[in-house]
Amino acid sequence: MAVVGAGQAGLALGYYLDRLGVSFRLLDSSDRVGASWSQRWDSLTLFTPRRYSSLPGLELPGDTWSYAGKDEVADYLKDYAHHFALPVQTGSRATRLSRVDGKFLLDLATGEQIGSRQVVIATGAFGKAFTPSLADSLDADITQLHAEKYRNPNMLPENVAVVGGGNSGFQIAHELAQAGKRVALSEGAQLPTLPQRLLGRDLFWWLTSTRLIHAPGDSRTGRRMRANEPIIGAPRRMLQDAGVKFCHAL
């Protein structure tokens, strides 16, 4: 079996495949396990406490109710693959998947071709950064930086427009404002916000205890939860108090 992607999903699947005695390979385009996490902005932390962030069979080190930073997550994923001796093949970007005579063929950027009767795509939904075509028409003197390349406030000038009102946009806008930047946050649909903690308990403790997080995707609750990804732990008032100005995208 071939598993394309050695992030959280691919590694967790690898753990169970190994326990079942299934022969498989985990293919990842990065040069090392956890690279996609280590390349994110410096202050990024998980929404979920460590107790809800561990992969099967190995706990994420640290206080179970604290929130791991992005470098901790990257190291944990690397250690996870090593701990269970999972067959990860890095530097193996899949470029094409085809089916011939009842068998799948995976072409890799290295020129290697892998044959397998079963293939799992575990690359996630955010592997390719999207920049709208409007960006090409902006003046060359305007600094443009996608969230994928953002690391810290020192990379940007004093006046910043953050385009995108999701969790990443809210977090980056808040960090920039706290660093003394003049920030405008442009959002499309106004997403609901949820507190990180409620009545002394973490949000995910409530979601797990009430089993809301386990609602089937095709149920009414599940459809509502999937339709609008909420902003977690960064209420609009907090950003406004920090000086962020909100505006709506056309």
Image (spheres, grey):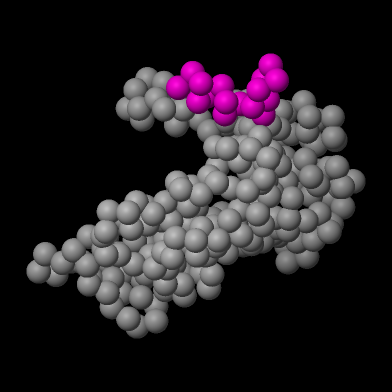
Instruction: Give the residue at x 47% y 75%.
Output: 91
Q: Position of residue 130 (x, y in %)?
A: 54, 55
* Closer to the camera in the image, 165 or 142: 165
Where, quadrant-wise, is the C terminus in this rendering?
top right
Verify whether residue 197 appears in magenta: yes
* Closer to the camera in the image, 79 or 47: 79
Q: Position of residue 86 (x, y in %)?
A: 41, 64
Tell which residue pokes out farthest to the left in this image.
101
* Magenta span of residues: 196-211
Could one spot residue 36 in this view of the protein? no
Could one spot residue 46 in this view of the protein? yes
Q: Using the image, determine if residue 204 lies above or below residue 200.
A: below
Instruction: Give the residue at x 78% y 56%.
Output: 152
User: Relative to 131, is 92 on the left or the right?
Assistant: left
Instruction: Give the residue at x 63% y 48%.
Output: 61
Q: Using the image, determine if residue 96 lies above or below residue 148.
A: below
Instruction: Give the residue at x 58% y 37%.
Output: 51
- Residue 137: name its quadrant: bottom right
Q: Position of residue 54 (x, y in %)?
A: 53, 45
User: Relative to 220, is 61 on the left or the right?
Assistant: right
Tell which residue pokes out farthest to the bottom in this image.
111
User: Relative to 108, is 42 on the left or the right?
Assistant: right
Verify whether residue 221 appears in magenta: no
* Closer to the camera in the image, 249 or 33: 33
- Residue 76: name its quadrant: bottom right
Where, quadrant-wise, is the N terminus in this rendering?
bottom left
User: Relative to 116, is 38 on the left or the right?
Assistant: right
